C-alpha cells in the first residue's frame, strides 16, 4: 500500500464518550500505515468535555492537534475548519463518534493510484429504515441536480487531495457540505473513486443526524448552492 503523507481529522460535537477511542484507533492505524501523518480533532463548540479531552490527547501525543470552533458552527463548519487546518497533501475525515472503522482507510488509500480522491459508501448502514429511505432520496436528488453518480453522498469516510481545498470555495455550514464538496470536485474534473465501508451503530452520545431541522436546512442550502455553482461562484 502507498505510504501517503496524510492529515486525518474528526469533527466532534459533544462526543466526550467517543472522542478518545476514535483518536486511539486512529493513532494505532496510522502508526502501522503511514510514516508522515497528523491527527486533528475539530471540537465544534461542544458543551460537554470533548474540548478538554481533545486538549489532553493533543498534549499526550505529538501527532495529535486539537482545534476548537467557538461557538458551534454545524457539521459543515466543522469540516471546513478541518480542511483549513490540514497541512499534508492528503486529507481524510470521518466522524468522531466511532461509527466507522478507521482501519478501513487502507481500502481508500489503495485506490489513490487511479483516482484523484476516494470516498466510501456504507455497505450495511446501521440506521432506521426511514433514515435509509431519506438518505437514498437525498443522494438521488443531489446526483440529479449536480449530474453526479455517487452511491452515498453523506458517507463520512472521505480521502481527498489537499489542493482541492485551494481550488474550490465551500459555503455550506450544515449537512449540505458533503454534496457541495462532491459537486464542486466533480465540476473541477476530479476523478473520485468509491469503495464500500462498514458502519456501526452509534455507541454513545446523542444522535442528531436525523433531526428534521438539519434536513430542512440541507434542502434550503441545496437550492442556494445550485444557484451559486451555475453562477460560477
Ligand atoms: N450533529 C452535529 N454533529 C456535528 C456538529 N459539528 C460536528 N459534528 C460531528 O459530526 C459527526 C456527524 O454527526 P452525527 O450526529 O454523528 O450524524 P450521523 O452519523 O448522520 O447521525 P447520528 O450518529 O445517528 O446522530 C459527529 O462526529 C459529530 O460529533 C454539529 O454542529 N452538529
Ligand atoms: Mg454519527
Image (cartoon, helix red, strand yellow):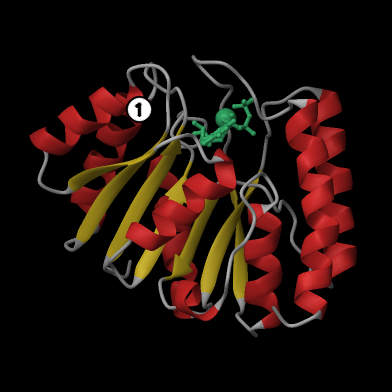
Q: Residue at x 30, y 47 (%)?
A: 40
Residue 79 on image: x %, y %: 49, 51
Q: Residue at x 64, y 55 (%)?
A: 172
Residue 4 on image: x %, y %: 29, 69
Residue 130 higher or lower than 64, as above or below: above
Near-viewer residue (212 or 60)? 212
Q: Name the image quarter holding the C terminus.
A: bottom right
Near-viewer residue (189 or 101)? 189
Residue 15 higher or lower than 102, as above or below: above
Q: How many marks?
A: 1
Q: Name the image quarter holding the N terminus.
A: bottom left
**Residue position for label 1:** 19
Q: Residue at x 53, y 77 (%)?
A: 115
Element under disc 1 = helix
Q: Is mark 1 within 8 Å of ligand 1?
A: no
Q: Residue at x 78, y 22 (%)?
A: 128
Residue 96 on image: x %, y %: 43, 34
Quadrant of ligand 2: it is top right
Left or right position of 48 against 119: left
Left or right position of 119 against 230: left
One can see residue 197 in this view? no
Callout 1 crowding tier (Cα within 10 Å): few <14, some 14–19, many ≥20: many
Residue 173 on image: x %, y %: 61, 49
Left or right position of 233 against 100: right
Near-viewer residue (45 or 99)? 45
One can see residue 91 in this view? yes
Near-viewer residue (71 or 200)? 71
Residue 100 higher or lower than 53, as above or below: below
Which image quadrant for residue 211? top right
Which image quadrant for residue 218? top right
Amino acid at each position: 500500500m502507498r505510504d501517503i503523507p496524510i492529515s486525518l481529522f474528526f469533527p466532534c460535537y459533544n462526543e466526550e464518550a467517543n472522542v478518545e477511542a476514535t483518536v486511539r484507533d486512529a493513532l494505532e492505524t496510522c502508526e502501522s500505515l503511514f510514516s508522515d501523518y497528523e491527527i486533528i480533532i475539530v471540537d465544534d463548540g461542544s458543551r460537554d468535555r470533548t474540548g478538554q479531552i481533545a486538549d489532553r490527547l493533543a498534549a499526550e501525543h505529538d501527532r495529535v492537534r486539537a482545534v476548537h470552533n467557538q461557538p458551534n458552527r454545524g457539521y459543515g463548519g466543522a469540516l471546513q475548519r478541518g480542511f483549513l487546518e490540514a497541512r499534508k497533501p492528503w486529507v481524510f475525515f470521518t466522524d468522531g463518534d466511532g461509527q466507522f472503522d478507521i482501519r478501513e482507510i487502507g481500502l481508500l488509500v489503495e485506490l489513490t493510484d487511479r483516482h484523484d480522491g476516494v470516498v466510501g459508501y456504507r455497505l450495511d448502514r446501521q440506521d432506521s429504515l426511514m433514515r435509509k429511505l431519506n438518505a437514498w432520496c437525498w443522494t438521488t436528488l443531489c446526483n440529479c441536480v449536480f449530474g453526479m453518480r455517487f452511491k452515498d453522498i453523506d458517507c463520512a469516510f472521505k480521502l481527498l487531495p489537499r489542493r482541492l481545498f485551494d481550488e474550490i470555495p465551500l459555503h455550506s455550514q450544515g449537512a449540505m457540505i458533503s454534496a457541495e464538496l462532491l459537486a464542486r470536485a466533480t465540476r473541477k474534473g476530479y476523478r473520485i473513486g468509491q469503495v464500500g465501508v462498514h458502519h456501526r451503530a452509534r455507541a454513545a452520545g446523542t444522535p442528531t443526524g436525523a433531526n428534521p431541522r438539519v434536513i430542512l436546512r440541507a434542502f434550503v442550502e441545496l437550492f442556494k448552492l445550485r444557484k451559486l455553482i451555475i453562477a460560477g461562484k
